Amino acid sequence: MIKKVDHIGIAVKSLENALPFYTEVLSLPLLKIEVVESQKVKVAFLQAGETKLELLEPVSEESTIAKFIEKRGEGIHHVALGVNSIEERIMELKEKGIRMIDESPRLGAGGAHIAFMHPKSSSGVLYELCEKKGLKG
Ligand code: ZN
């Protein structure tokens, strides 16, 4: 069902302040920076071997990332699992009694189809299912 850990989402107050650690200290290639309007975040993707790191900076106080940082501070926000046929995976999870935040997929960064599981179902870890339909990476 799960192909790999696609990326790890990390909440930061400022991409500008956070990025040098990744690009200069860890020397990770910066793949792209984009604003995801639907989630009110600006994201930066870095390649870390097979997996990517997704830095998320809130662009509005309404953003769930802004609320996350306010409550818990900066840090790991979610783990994204790469899947195929995301609609079927959501169905399977629901059949297994997993509560979904997103009952149907929505568009995430880079045009990926994503759906979040409710962390109550997974010992406090926020998992994202992520399908790159016809997208590379
Ligand atoms: Zn993500």
Image (cartoon, rainbow, N blue to C red):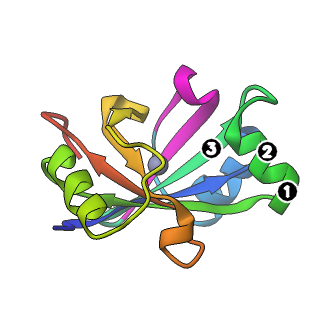
Element under label 2?
A: helix
Amino acid type, callout 1 = Lys
Amino acid type, callout 2 = Lys
35 relative position to 86: left or right = right
Q: Residue at x 42, y 53 (%)?
A: 100
Q: Residue furthest bottom?
A: 123
Q: Which mark is residue 71?
A: 1
Question: Front-most of 9 and 61?
Answer: 61
**Residue 34: % across, % down:** 51, 27
In front: mark 3 or mark 2?
Answer: 2
86 relative position to 5: left or right = left
Q: Residue at x 14, y 52 (%)?
A: 84
Element under label 1?
A: helix
Q: Which mark is residue 67?
A: 2
Q: Are marks 2 and 1 in contact (CB under 8 Å)?
A: yes
**Residue 79: % across, % down:** 47, 63
**Residue 105: % across, % down:** 32, 37
- Marks 2 and 1, Cα distance to the nearest angstrom? 6 Å
Q: Which mark is residue 56?
A: 3
- Marks 1 and 3, Cα distance to the nearest angstrom? 15 Å
120 relative position to 81: left or right = right
Query: Ligand 1 closer than 8 Å to the CB at disc 3?
Result: yes
46 relative position to 62: left or right = left
Question: Front-most of 13 and 113?
Answer: 113
- Marks 3 and 2, Cα distance to the nearest angstrom? 12 Å
Q: Is residue 135 above or below residue 118?
A: above
Range of magenta residues: 32-48
Give the overall secondary structure of the magenta segment.
Answer: strand
Q: Is residue 114 above or below residue 37?
A: below
**Residue 88: % across, % down:** 15, 50
Q: Residue at x 80, y 52 (%)?
A: 69
Q: Residue furthest right?
A: 70
